[in-house]
Image (spheres, rainbow, N blue to C red):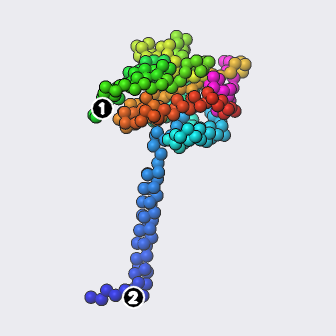
């Protein structure tokens, strides 16, 4: 059998089969791009994702991203590669907002919201209370471990027989004004959601009179957005500025998905060193310069 490769045979092969080479090249390029994008995709703990319910200033948030990543890097922490602000318009009658909370909300780290949105997020158990004493079971098949404490006082981690102390994430005296879900907030919530089934027992035990957010004015005037004025029923400015709050999102505590960089609140398999949501708050306290 004559298997010699001649110029004539090669030209005939290209004439009839050239498209196979094009297909092969396209498949190779596609696989290379797919594999590269998969390997290069950032993990949750490498991002600081901020859920925000009011319009914000792109220039200031981009400035914050660059400065905050450099700040961490200067301290020898190169974990966070990206800071993202995601705008989601809050409307209690909009079902898509509720669907968002049921699906992807717990992948975010921080939330910036106006008072009405804060009432909804807090009363439905979406945020971490700074002064509530949490007892969290983080046991795995290999180790028995649990954590007890709160954000203002610090935590005690017990891993088998070993006990480790985790310092407070925030100092209560460092901020002048907080969002506290008191009786007044509860009364307004009941009025706003009179047609809904409100879990009063849950609110009384886990929500009532606890602290869930820091007023942005405690960090800087017009931080990331223009606060504007409260309007009366006719839509006229009242001279009173709107209040906006910064809170930390309560993640799920599954084995592999902790919802972001929340230190002690991370998933069982994530490092307790990933506490960048709290670091960001303290950074803003020290650098209140991202004003509109």
In this picture, residue 3 sits left or right of residue 151? left
Element type where label 1 sits in the image: loop
The answer to whether residue 182 is seen in the rendering is yes
Q: Nearer the viewer, mark 2 or mark 1?
A: 1
Magenta segment range?
216-235
Which residue is situated farthest in the top direction here? 183
Pointer 1 residue: 143
Q: Residue at x 63, y 22 (%)?
A: 218
- Residue 6 lies, in percent from the top left, at 39, 88
Is the N terminus in the top left, top right, bottom left or bottom right quadrant? bottom left
User: Which is more toward the observer, 39 or 140?
Assistant: 140
Mark 1 Cα within 10 Å, few/some/many (few <14, many 20+)?
Answer: few
Percent across and percent down for residue 143 are 30, 32
**Looking at this view, is 217 or 24 the one in front?**
217
The percent position of residue 246, horizontal first and vertical second, equals 57, 26
Residue drawn at (52%, 32%) of the image: 277
Dot 2: few (<14), some (14–19), or many (≥20) neighbours within 10 Å?
few
In the rendered structure, does residue 52 fall within the stretch colored magenta? no
Q: Secondary structure at mark 2?
A: loop
**Residue identified by numbered label 2:** 6
Quarter placement of the C terminus: top right
Instruction: Determine the image quadrant of residue 268.
Output: top left
In the visual, does 147 lie left or right of 113? left
The percent coordinates of residue 248 (x first, y second) are: 51, 27
Q: Main secondary structure of the magenta part?
A: loop
């Amino acid at each position: 059998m004559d298997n010699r490769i001649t110029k004539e045979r090669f030209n005939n092969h290209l004439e009839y089969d050239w498209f196979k080479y094009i297909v092969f090249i396209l498949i190779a390029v596609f696989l290379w791009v797919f594999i590269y994008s998969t390997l290069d995709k950032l993990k949750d703990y490498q991002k600081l994702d901020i859920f925000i319910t009011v319009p914000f200033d792109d220039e200031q948030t981009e400035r914050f991203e660059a400065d905050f990543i450099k700040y961490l890097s200067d301290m020898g922490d190169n974990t966070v590669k990206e800071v993202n602000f995601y705008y989601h318009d809050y409307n209690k009658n909009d079902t898509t907002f509720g669907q968002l909370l049921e699906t992807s909300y717990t992948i975010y780290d921080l939330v910036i919201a106006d008072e009405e949105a804060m009432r909804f997020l807090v009363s439905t158990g979406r945020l971490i209370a700074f002064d509530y004493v949490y007892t969290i079971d983080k046991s795995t098949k290999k180790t028995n471990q649990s954590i007890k404490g709160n954000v203002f006082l610090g935590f005690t981690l017990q891993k088998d027989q070993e006990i480790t102390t985790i310092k407070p994430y925030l100092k209560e005296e460092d901020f002048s004004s907080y969002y506290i879900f008191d009786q007044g907030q509860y009364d307004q919530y009941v009025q706003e959601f009179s047609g809904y089934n409100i879990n009063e027992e849950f609110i009384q035990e886990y929500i009532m009179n606890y602290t869930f957010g820091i007023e942005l004015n405690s960090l800087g005037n017009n931080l990331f957005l223009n606060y504007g004025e409260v309007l009366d029923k006719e839509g006229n400015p009242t001279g009173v500025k709107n209040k906006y709050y910064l809170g930390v999102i309560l993640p799920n505590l599954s084995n592999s998905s902790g919802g972001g960089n929340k230190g002690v609140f991370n998933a069982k398999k994530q490092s307790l060193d990933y506490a960048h949501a709290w670091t960001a708050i303290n950074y803003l306290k020290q650098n209140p310069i991202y004003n509109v």
